[in-house]
Amino acid sequence: MSAVILCPLLCSGLPEVVIRASDSKIQEGGNLTFECHVTGSPTPTVTWALDGLASQYNIQGRIWDSMVELVLHLTKVSSSDNLHNLTCQAENQAGPGEEMVQLDIEFPVKIIFLRDAESQHHWCFPFAVDGNPEPSIRWLYNGSALTETRYTYTQLIPDTDDGSVKHGCLFLNKPTHLNNGYYTIIVENKLGRDEATATGKFMDNPFDPFDPEGIIPVSTNKSDGDVTENAETRVSVAVGMAVFACTFLLIMVLVINKCGQHSKFGIHRSSVLGTEDDLAVSLRFMNFGGSPPSSDEDSGLSSFVENPQYFCGIIKDKDMCVQHIKRQDIVLKWELGEGAFGKVYLAECANLSPDSDKMLVAIKTLKDANESTRQDFQREAELLTVLQHQHIVRFYGVCTDGEPLAMVFEYMRHGDLNRFLRAHGPDARILEEVKMPPLGQLTLPQMLHIAAQIASGMVYLASLHFVHRDLATRNCLVGEGLVVKIGDFGMSRDIYSTDYYRVGGRTMLPIRWMPPESIMYRKFTTESDIWSFGVVLWEIFTYGKQPWYQLSNSEAIECITQGRELERPRTCPKEVHLLMQGCWQREPQQRLVIKDIHSRLLALVKNPPVYLDILG
Ligand code: AMP
C-alpha cells in the first residue's frame, strides 16, 4: 500500500535520450535515418528540433510504456545542411533531456567567390570555398603553379560563422608590378574540383606603361578591327610619349652638357610653399664656385637663372653635375610610400659606385608628368645635386631614359622620422599601422642624438644660405644605426596632408611649423627655419605628435600669431625646452642661430641632463 502511494515520487525519472543513426556520413542527395529513443517516467513528450534544416524529412513515432521512439527520415540531403545540428528534445514532470547529432554530408568542393586583389594590411585575394571532405587549395599564377612563401601565402580566416564555408585570403606582402597578373585558385576534394581566376593589379610598371609584365587580357573577344585600333592607339601614344620624353631628355642633355653655362630653367618653388621665388632667392646666395653671395635679395629670378654655376658647378672642390643613371641598372623591389611627385620605391641599382656591385636605393618617380611638375621634379634634382652633406639624404642622380622620370636616393631603411618617432613612443602599440623592429621607446640620449644630426644638416644648409622652408620630422629620414638625415625638399606625401594648410588653389602651407612672420607675410628666412627647428625638437620630444594637434588650422594660426607657445613635452629636459624657446622668439633676429643650437645639442649628447618626469 505504501509502495503505491510512494510510486509517483520514487518512480519518476528524467528522460534519457539516445540517438541511433543509420549512417554517420552520407553524400549529398542520399537518405539518412536517425532514431531517437527516450525513456523516462512519466512518459516524456519528444520532439526533433530541426530549425533551418534544408533537406526534406518526415518523422514517425512509437510509444511503449515509458519508452518513446521518434524516427527522423531525411531524404535527398542537401549539402547546405552539412554541420547542421539535429536535436532530439524530451520532457516529463521530472525535467528535460536532450541529445544532439551533427550532420556530416559529403559534397564536391565549390568556390563561393574569388575576388580581385584588394589592399588590406597586405594585398589579399579574398575567397570562400565550401566542400566536405575539406578541400586542398593551391594556386596558379598566370597559369603556372604558384609556390607559397612567407611573402605569398594562403590563410584561412577562423570562425567566420558561415556554416561549413571557409573564408580566406591569398596574401601577398608588398607586391610590385612584377606580381601583376592572373591568380587561379584550384580546390579539390575526393568528390570534385573547382577553379576560379582573379586579377592582381598591384601597381603600374613604373618604368614602362606598355610593359609586357603588365596585365594582358587572358582572352579577348575583340574583332581584328578593335585590335588594330588598339595597336594604333598604343603606337600613337607611345610615339607621343617618346616625343615628350625626348623633348625632356633633350632639355636635360642641353642643360647637363652646358656645364658652366646658363641653366635654361627658371627657378620657382614647388607648390608647397607658394609660387613666388623665395627658393630662387635663397639659392642665389649659395656659394657656387666661389661666386660671392649677393645681398640684393630683391633682384629676383633672372640674375639667379643667369648664374652660370647653377646646374653644374663646383662646391667645395666637388663637380656638381646631375648624374644620369641607366634604367636598365635599376631593378624595383617594392613600394615604400608616396610623395608629392609620385611613388617611392625600394630598388636595387647597379653601377652606382665602383666599390659595390649593387646597392639598395630609394627611387622617386614622377607621376602625371606635365610641364610644371617636370620642372618641379627637375628643380629638386638640381637642388639635391648640389646639397651634399652627411646629414642630407644622399642623391645619386636621375633616370630619364624612358617614363616615368625618376630620382635615385640612398635608401634609409627606417623611413621618415615622424613615423619612426611614433613607432618608438608610448603609443606605438595602439598605432597598428606601424610595424617596426622592437627598438623600444626612444631614450633621452637617442632623442638628443637625432636632434643634433638634424641641426648639423641645418648648419650646412644655412652655410649655403639655403632656406628649407618645410623642416619637419616628416621630411627627415632614418637609416641604420639611428642615422638621421634631412630628406625632403619638396612637398610631403599625401598621408601628411593634414600637416599642411591649403591656401588658394595649389599652395599648401605647413602652418604648424611656421613662425608668425611666415604665416602673415610669407617671409621665409634662415630664421624661420630656426623656428621650424624648434618645432622639430618638440616633435622629437613628443614622439611625433602633431604640433597643436588639439587645434584646427585656423585656431593654430591664431595661437601662433598671438604668441602662444607649444607646451613643454613631458619628457623634455629644461635645457632642451630652453632651446625650443630660443627658436620661438617672436623677433626673427632674437632667435638662436643654428650653429649655437647644434653645439649646445652636441654638448647635451655628451652629457645628457638627468631628467625627472615630474608628471609621470
Ligand atoms: P617623400 O617623397 O620624401 O615624401 O617620401 C614618401 C615615402 O617614401 C615616405 O614614406 C618615406 O618614408 C619614403 N622614402 C622617401 N625617401 C626615402 C629613402 N631615401 N629611403 C627610404 N624611404 C624613403
Image: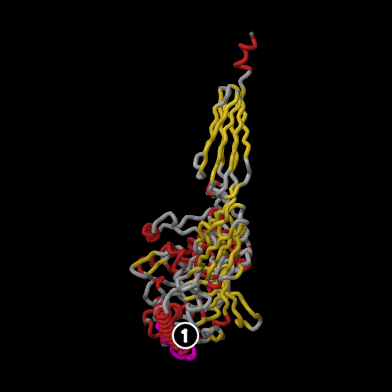
| Residue drawn at 49 percent across, 64 percent down | 116
Identify whether 171 is placed above or below 348: above
Between 499 and 430, which is closer to the camera in this rendering? 430
The percent position of residue 567, horizontal first and vertical second, equals 47, 55
Tell me the quadrant of the picture where the N terminus can be found: top right
Between 438 and 523, which is closer to the camera in this rendering? 438
The percent position of residue 403, horizontal first and vertical second, equals 48, 80
Q: Quadrant of residue 518?
A: bottom left
Colouring scheme, one of rainbow, by chain, secondary structure, one colour:
secondary structure
Tell me the kind of residue under disc 1. Tyr
User: Which residue, given by chain and number where applicable, does mark 1 sit on?
Assistant: 310
One can see residue 480 in this view: yes
**552 to the left or right of 103:** left
Q: Which residues are magenta?
A: 254-266
One can see residue 382 in this view: no
Between 305 and 218, which is closer to the camera in this rendering? 218
Identify whether 456 is placed above or below 542: below
The percent position of residue 571, horizontal first and vertical second, equals 55, 55
Dominant secondary structure of the magenta stretch? loop
Identify whether 110 is placed above or below 344: above
| Residue drawn at 46 percent across, 59 percent down | 547
Disc 1 within 8 angstroms of ligand 1 (CB): no
